[in-house]
Image: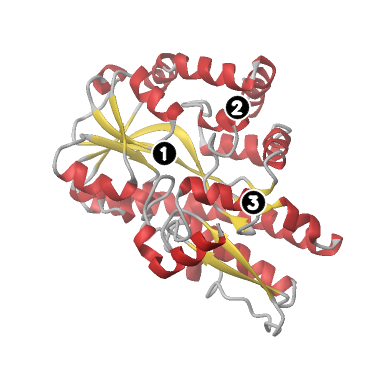
Amino acid sequence: MKKLITMALTVGMALSMAACGGNSGSAGTTAAAAGSGESKAEVSADAKKLLYVHGASDTSILQTTAEYFKSLIEERTDGRYTVEIHPNFELGSLTESVQMIKSGDVQLSGVCLGSYYSDALAIVDLPNAVPTIEDAYKLYAESEFRTYIEDALRKENIEMLDFGAVYFREMTSNVEIHSADDIKGINIRTLENPYHTEYWKALGANPSPLAWAETYISLQQGLVDAQENPLDSIVGGKLYEVQKYVINTNHIVYTSPILVNEDFFNSLSAEDQEIFRQAGKETEEYVYSYAREQESKLAQQLKDNGMEFIDLDEATLSELKNRASSVYDSVRKQVGDDIMDQFLAAVDQVTGK
């Protein structure tokens, strides 16, 4: 793995734009979020360098998260730690990046959460499970169900400092979508995630798992009609050049987490552990609010570039969820009845049902 990291550093951006994230565009940088993004602390000669990886561009919400956290850590440890951020999967693919944080080849990760970390996290891949991002934040940042996510990650040698519920993944298309039936027959690019592809199949679409780097050209050449991503990826990938509509399907929560290798975290003093935990908590709160501000700006950018937004009513969103019952069955089988029932009960609690 160390050889992989060394080789990857020599090719840099060539390994960019795959899977969860991709080129996420001008959603606003941490210069807007946290000054210059650099710590004011003087770095000591023997400062320990921490590697932080994620899969989006250096102007994405994932980068905003990384840089805000970096500024807090470097300042509050008086420069005893420096954080070196590697966006765009510079050090390896999605799968390799997940393995790096588990093994400790990197100390920090912002790679989006999902079942590729653990079968127990298939719960995060449930479609149309949470009505709003505000509800998702309550569920994953404030409710008792967060403990389940933390425990599942600890079994993979990972400590979660920030879940990072920031956006929904939305559908874009060259065909107008106003009902669940309109999705039938659509050729759509998806992530390489079995629960995501099962969702679109359940809706009658033809999902094609493709790397992000292949998405624009596939849309341009008509190999696929549609794709799904958060708004900052749609802006950054200039998909407005090859797509006409944004359909607010709100189907999957897009996360911007902060994860730390547990062996490294356990090696820290109690004081430094508290610094890391508090920095994660503050970053989670900040980036959530920052993303709410950016959402309308991103939507306006897409409208200014000719895209039309289609809002689906509650009845249609409910129908999408109903048609995805096979995905719920698959996840229930994976995580067990007890966890599935706990999750659904937690959703009901945060939504007031």
Dot 3 alpha-carbon crowd within 10 angstroms: few under 14, some 14 to 19, many 20 or more: some
**Front-most of residues 66 and 208:** 208
Dot 1 alpha-carbon crowd within 10 angstroms: few under 14, some 14 to 19, many 20 or more: many
Nearest to N terminus: mark 1 or mark 2: 1
Horizontal and vertical percent for residue 169?
41, 38
Q: Quadrant of residue 265?
A: bottom right
Tag count: 3
Q: Does dot 1 land on a helix, a strand or a loop?
A: strand
Horizontal and vertical percent for residue 346?
66, 25
Marks 3 and 1, how far apart at CA? 29 Å
Horizontal and vertical percent for residue 51?
59, 64
Marks 1 and 2, how far apart at CA? 20 Å
Verify CB contact (< 8 Å) between mark 1 and mark 2.
no
Horizontal and vertical percent for residue 76?
73, 71
Residue at left 64%, top 24%? 343
- Give the quadrant of the C terminus: top right
Q: Nearer the viewer, mark 1 or mark 2?
A: 1
Q: Quadrant of residue 219?
A: top left
Residue at left 23%, top 48%? 216
Q: Which residue is mark 2?
A: 351
Is residue 169 among what the camera can see? yes
Q: Residue furthest right?
A: 270
Could you tell me the amino acid type at mark 1? Answer: Arg
Q: Which residue is mark 1?
A: 169
Could you tell me the amino acid type at mark 2? Answer: Thr
Q: Which mark is residue 103?
A: 3
Nearest to N terminus: mark 3 or mark 1: 3
Q: Nearer the viewer, mark 3 or mark 2?
A: 3
